[in-house]
Amino acid sequence: MADNSNEIKSFSALGIKEELIKKLEELSITEPSQIQANVIPEILQKKNVIFESETGTGKTFAFLLPLVQALEEIPSKEEKIIIIAPTYELASQIKTNAAKITGLKTSLFIGGTPLKRQIEALKDKPQIIIGNPSRILELIHLKKLKTSNVKAVVLDEADRLISVEIADETKKLLATIPCDAQFIACSATINDNTKKILGGIFSNPNFVIMPKEDILSKKITHWAIFAENRDKIAALKSFILAENPEKALVFTSRADQVENIASKLLYKKVDCMALHAKTDKKERKAAIDRFRNGKCRILVTSDLASRGLDIQGVSHIIQMDLPSNEDFFIHRSGRTARAGKTGINVVIGDEYEMRKYAALEKKFGLTVYPKVLYKGKVVNPSDIEYQE
């Protein structure tokens, strides 16, 4: 599909109604992003769409705006849309964004919360259903949620929704949706396998793959700090004290290391919060809220626990290892440099990880700058040689 984004500078030109445009203006959103300019007309035409766009490019409003508009134009209050997300945080953020542009009843249905309360919420007949596949599927099986009047389904972070862990639940849920419903899927990374699986589920989908905006190479500065495995947490502490980041996400591939890293930082009087897949929901919300509002500037997390987090003002990404899945490297890095801002991505790694980092540097067209911690500062190796 041709990229029409350079020609379209207004939401009205895309077919979005004045009422919604006013809501966007209240959010200081006046022009559509590239992905919005390309996807909104497709969705308004009721097409099945699978789209890929980099992190922070406005994917959520790309599907919310046309679907909300279509739903508001239907006289019947029985019609609904379902938006599926892999994590509580992402589902919650979608609900928050929906509330900013529409007064339609919107409800969140996620595991780990009382089922009875969610059944009660369905009695209010929400028209926008948002949640994870397992809980929504459970409500369908209990005959508390009818899908016969579902007009559209969205898979946000689609690659995660069809991963081995939850693919069966996602497919079972989609099997309950009427064949004439509209199907939409999106993610920052949609590989060939994801395309193949989604292409088998959706009927005649339109693929919209946006050209890379090179946020990874143009908006993010990449640093490498060498440290043996036993010295990594000490290097992390020294880096935080030297760099004094405005807001930093610390990543580790191992969920069991999240608490270990956080506890050692806290022992060294570095204020931080921990977030991993097994964190209690209330604790997760408290950690994210403290991090979001700046009361705590360091959040230690795992890849799966952080997927879908959209937190403004993250100045630094610190990777304590390199994930085996290259897409995770993109998702990690993309937590910074959002909404036109810049950011710093740091890998603290041993010799093996530095070799992997060099391979990613070549593959993604990055420039990685070696850094060392010296006398309480983050400096270039040449600076030490000069001073000595």
Image (cartoon, rainbow, N blue to C red):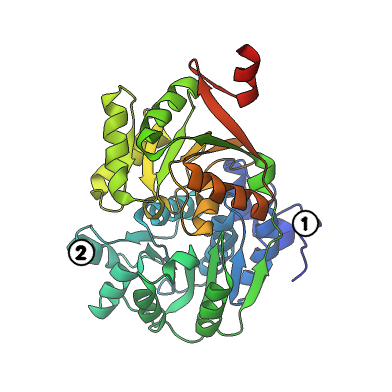
Q: Amino acid at mark 1?
A: Ile
Q: Pointer 2: what residue?
A: 115
> With respect to residue 270, does 52 lie above or below?
below
Q: Position of residue 77 (x, y in %)?
A: 42, 71
Which quadrant: the C terminus?
top right
329 relative position to 116: left or right: right
363 relative position to 115: left or right: right
Query: Which residue is farthest right?
Result: 7
Which quadrant: the N terminus?
bottom right
Residue plotted at (39% across, 65% down): 129
Q: Pointer 1: what residue?
A: 8
Q: Is residue 156 visible?
A: no
Q: Amino acid at mark 2?
A: Leu
Q: Quadrant of residue 121 in the image?
A: bottom left
Residue plotted at (81% across, 57% down): 7
Of residue 282 and residue 167, the one placed in the foreground of this image is 167
Q: Position of residue 262 (x, y in %)?
A: 30, 35
112 relative position to 15: left or right: left
> With respect to residue 344, does 2 lie above or below?
below
> With respect to residue 47, does 97 lie above or below?
above
Q: Is residue 80 visible?
A: yes
SS state under label 2:
helix
Mark 1 and mark 2: Cα distance apart in space: 45 Å
Q: Position of residue 252 (x, y in %)?
A: 39, 46
Of residue 58 and residue 369, the one placed in the foreground of this image is 369
Of residue 24 and residue 294, the one placed in the foreground of this image is 294
Q: Quadrant of residue 19 in the image?
A: bottom right
